[in-house]
Image (tube, helix red, strand yellow):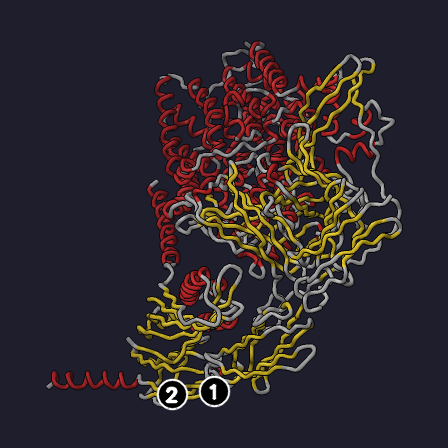
Amino acid sequence: MMRAALNVLVILALAGGAYFVSWPAVMADAGSPEVELNAENLGPRPIEELTEKSITRDYGHAWQTMAAALRENRSDLLDGYFTGIAKAILAEEIAEQKRSGVRVRYTDQGHKLEAIFYSPSGDAMQLRDRARLEVEIVDGDKVVHREDVTLNYLVLMTPGADRWLVRDLQTTAAEVRP
Amino acid sequence: MKYFVPLLITAATVVLIAIAWVNSGGMERERMRSSRTSEEAVRLLLTQAQARNWDRAHALLANASDVEKSAFVADLAGSNGSLLTFANLENFDLWPLHKTDREASMRVKLHYSTAVGPLEDVRDLKVQHEGETWRVVWPTTTVARVAPQVIPVNYLRWDIINRGAEDDWGVQNVDSPQVRILSMNALQRPDRIVIVGEVVNEDTVPAYVNVGATLLRPDGSTFAQESSFDKISHTLLPKQVSPYRIDFPEARMNQVKSVRMDVKSLLVAASADPVIEVSDQRLQTDALGKNLLLGQLLNQSGQVVNIPHVVAAYYDDSGKVIWVSDGYVDQALLPQIPVPFAVDLPDDVAPKVHNYHVNVNYFNVNRS
Amino acid sequence: MRLFLASVLIPLALMICAAAAELRAPAQVTAGKSFSLASTGNGKGMLYLTGPGQASKRSVMLGDEIQIRGDEVEHAGRYTAVICDSGNCAATHFFVRAAEPAKVSLLVHPSRVRVGQPNAISGVAFVFDKFRNLVLSPTQVDFKAIPKQGAAVAQTRPTQNGVTWIRLTSATKEGPAKIGASLGKVSELRVVQQVASEACNLRIKPDWNGGKFFAETEPVRDCSGNAVSDGTVVSFTKVDASGKTTVDVPIKRGVARVQMPLKGNAKILVASGVVTGNELSVEGRQ
Amino acid sequence: METTFFRRPIPLAAILLLAVVVHGPLLLMELPLNTSYDANLHVFFASHYAHHWFDPWNEKWFAGFSQTTYPPLAHYWIAIFSYVVGLRMAYMLVQMIAILLLVAGVYRFARLFVSERAASYAALFTVFLGTVAFLVYSAGQLSTLLSASIYLLALPYFYQWSRTAHWRGLVKGVVLILVAASVHHVTLLFGSFLFALPVLWLALADRGERSVFAVLGRAVFFAVLAGIGVGVVLLPYWIAILKHPIEQMPIPHASRSNFLLNINYAINYFFIPYGAMIVAFPAILWLGSANRRLRPLLLGFWVAFLFGLGGTTPIPKWVFGRAFEILTYERFTLSAAVLALPLVGLFAEYLLDRYRSAAVAGLAVCCVLTMGLALGWLAWSPFKTLSSLNVDQVTDFLNRDGHDKYRYLTLGFGNALPKVSTYTTANSVDGEYNSARLLPEMTRYGAAQLTSAKYFGTAGMESLRAMLKHANNYGLKFIFVHEPYYEPMVAFAGWRKVETYDYGSVTVWSKDDVSPARPIQSDAMPAPWEGLLWGTLPLGSSILAILLALLFPDRARVRETVVEFPAPTEEIYAREAR
């Protein structure tokens, strides 16, 4: 009887262990980063109230899913908020990560967005983002590089079925170190 | 004990089965197999029709020799892909109007479950006493037949070449049609908020249109979201106007600060055929005091329209849309054969109606 | 003595180790062009290269020039190169900028426009290099609008952050207009259909044919004289003794025509979209 | 020792082998997945556990529902086997195990009442039992069958503990009850009355010198312990059911009908499940009443029989009240048949003793006819299932080009819906498991699945209409139509036909203004700790039961009952020969 009970305990412990191993993947799905949008100097088309809300929300979600996709090496996560060249480059990066075992981890500390161009027909918007990030380059479990950095991005977003999608996400040279 | 228990169990089982048989309408069913009264005769006929036992049902008619079986079947179960062919007779109510020893008149309300929702059909039937039994005299109708003819069809048709699934951003594309909401009027009804209005396709290509509305609370948050569903003509040819109606059940105006309208349009392949004429339109009050908009539909093309759907907009004297009602027509539209229709409108709206416009939408079995 | 040696040699060794991990990169690199990173130190080390579409590692010899192939830096943006030697790592960053402009993405809207609409057509050009990087340095884009009839209109606009745009007024005559954007040898062309505007002066006339009454519009045109497209719906409404009759008829070969049985005197009205036409009073014939 | 072949008990191993020979090929052909109503549903549930072991929240149906509303053990075992043999074959494997356990369970249960020989006949008849074939190949009620089997195995321990206070009986019995409850709680609930009471009665009858109160006390202790155990093992289930008691409008079910008013229902729910056993009803009555020890069995059979008749007698309505409209009654036919089997075994013993080869031939023909009829009914029945519908193109469509970002609906797919749901990554607003429905568009109407809306008349079509009205809210973009009946509503509501499969047998409709689906918030979502319990305790209880069986095997029985037919006197029917 004791043996049986022990066996059961072992099984339960294994199951519990498996659960808690899978737990971090669930818990790591943190909330959207803080995004501030300034559309004062936007042209030639003025931004609509709903579009402003949507851009702020969707850009935040895009960063959230990008960080998760790079952390977990899951290119399927990119489908939600990326399209075109941005999605292709990120998918390529994830494929490279899988091949080399090197990963880039982003800890997002907020974005200051400035909308700079909104096409007359409302089908493309270009923005400048000043992103505060903690970037880690990890090889296996070893962190080979870690930095806190503020980076400038030039972003091109286009409307999708129910949200704005990031079509191009390019770092530009003006970099400021904290 | 050896005999008592089996006998007791057997007897108890038989008694229980008998009780349940009576409770679940076994007696009534037996009664329905006879037609010793005028009511029983109508019940028997409609029960057979319900079971789609057409031979038996037709044989039960007093004037079976005068009524074509196909016409009788078409009358109760539809033909030519009409709405009744997509329906089941769920149940019926009947009550006598008058009765003598020789004949009686019965009113029946047929409750159909159809592919687009419930449908009720009220009919008055004559019942005759023949020997020991009563029999229903079915109204003699003949199946409408179109005279052989050639109807040239040379209306326009728009076809679309769709873009592929691949992301071809920045290359040539065809924009969605320009559609516009012409009017919007939010009304408080006893049990709901209703938004009525009209939408027009301003473009030169056909548009597939859906109108949606969002009720917003004073704090700007969404209170409810609904769409026009089937109370609109979804396919609009260039410059065509369609009424729409959006219902928000259980909503009250004091809960809402504003309404956000949303019209979505899509470029679709479409044909300008068939053209359906809506003639003899008039507002009328029926015997039960219901306000109705009556008229006839005439299919001017050469193809059958299986399920016509009438959407009517009513205007007040300032030209504002004050109500939109709709109804499905249970007969198919054969070429050149007029088919009557009726849609109702609320009692409090009827006196304010100054004008109205009827739009005909349709479903064809082989083209959707 | 031992203590002294240890206190001198250990920091020295650490400094050597630290020095071994030094890495230098050029400040700007062009996409798709190979270049080299300068490293110091000796022995073997591990180079990590991360950036847009890149997350690789490879063994390198320290102290040598480390070659970075062009295909490793095809995407514009910020790259980080890290070199590690026995647990010590040093990093450097460099920016890859887009190569020469090689492609223009041209967004032209709308694809159909009514005639005579001021600033109704917009064209937006995005300039990319051959690796699909947005070219951020200012570039001149030539826009050209070629109507079906008449002279072409050209305008040159500089890009800002890789984008430039133009607005055009639609012509007064219907027909396709070509809108193009070119950049050196590269050019893109889009077609905008200019279509007739709302019907103008919509009129109907009676027509008795074989004892049947037909209501027919005169050729339906907009205010500029362009024929309204076939298929456009015209609503006929007849009010007579039998009640009201409405028929939605599409325009065919420029006119809309419908047969309407009459019962006594009738009033016939016509409308197309929000435009209403004349009213016709007809006396029924037996 | 009897040497005549006809007078010897059939070894249980041989009967189990026969069960494999009879049912094995049918299961290898995956018959239940193509002919039964519920098999695909169980595969669907199992598929979810295979992918999300500790997360019972399944977003594939009803815009999200909790699988804690259905005991999970059978599904977890399918999930485990699926890692090796795939989902479909894993289902067959668990189904085969259920049949084998039922044979063993009937044998052990019958053994409490009748001789080893009669019990072996009862077990043999189980293989060919119409209700077993009906539940396996027509109803697809894996859980009912498996739970009943395990429950039958638990009953001898309950008898042992109640009668002799043997602690192993208590432990093994309670653990098996937990396992049975983890498979299907409803079977256990009704089984407690229909099976446990006759066994308790028997324990009292066989108590010998022991006190009545001691036997009853032990039985109560067993019940309390089992009740607490079931409460703990299925805790997430109780939480779910307390949070959302079933308040939806009752859904019609044919097993609640009066079979006398519809011959097809009578065939489906009476003649097919009982088969040739109907011929033995007089003998069952006779034997059951003639023998004091068998009377509780007869009474249990009679009660289960009456319940199994659904609306043919008023008893279920009187007993269950409003719950009558929630329950289905075909499961009681299984209970009735199993309760009758010991008596049928006894009757067979009598026939064999008297008619020898003729009896063998007669009984064999009855067995084959009963099972043959049940299998034939799959083809002849007017109640056709759609489980064999080819849904590959539907799942291909949903899994490509980001179509799974939207929710979908099938119309006219019947019980092929779970098959679609199992193999697609997209989610649906419909589902085949009525108890988990919480969306108001479904619970406010007296209709079950939207995919079969037309069969529920106006209620069904109104429910469908309500759902289509809220398509934008649910991200419901794609509708797959297998019956043209639904096309008018779909077309008038704003969907357009976009693709056609199988020469027009299935059409795909799309509504273009629908935004991608977003998660629908629900308070029915189980907490993570509930998922942990759900993923461990039910399976743990079954593993414990297996370990107990392996580590502490039952001692070989030396007991022999001497119930004979016809009985010489009323008093001497059972005697222990130790």
Indicate left or right for C286 with B253 as reference: right
Q: Which residue carries the number 2 mark?
A: C26
Q: Residues within 10 Å of mark 1 (few under 14, many from 20)?
A: some
Using the image, name the chain to which the residue with label 1 belongs. C
Residue at 84% in and 24% down: B63
Q: Which residue carries the number 1 mark?
A: C33
Indicate left or right for B304 with B160 as reference: right
Instruction: Estimate the x, y position of residue B268 in percent, counting from the top left.
Output: 66, 59
**Residue type indicated by callout 1:** Lys
Spatial separation of the CA atoms under disc 2 and disc 1: 12 Å
Using the image, name the chain to which the residue with label 2 belongs. C
Closer to the camera in the image, D320 or D229: D320
Closer to the camera in the image, D112 or A31: A31
Closer to the camera in the image, B227 or A15: B227
Residue at 50% in and 34% down: D248
Indicate left or right for B54 with D237 as reference: right
Residue furthest to the bottom: C64
- C22, above or below B91, in the image: below
Instruction: Estimate the x, y position of residue C70 in percent, counting from the top left.
Output: 48, 85
Who comes first in sequence, dot 2 or dot 1?
2
Which image quarter holds the N terminus of chain B?
A: top right
Label 1's element? loop
Instruction: Estimate the x, y position of residue B322 in percent, counting from the top left.
Output: 58, 43
| Residues at discs 2 and 1 in contact (Cβ within 8 Å) | no
Residue furthest to the left: C1
Label 2's element? loop
Instruction: Estimate the x, y position of residue D15 in percent, counting from the top left.
Output: 58, 35
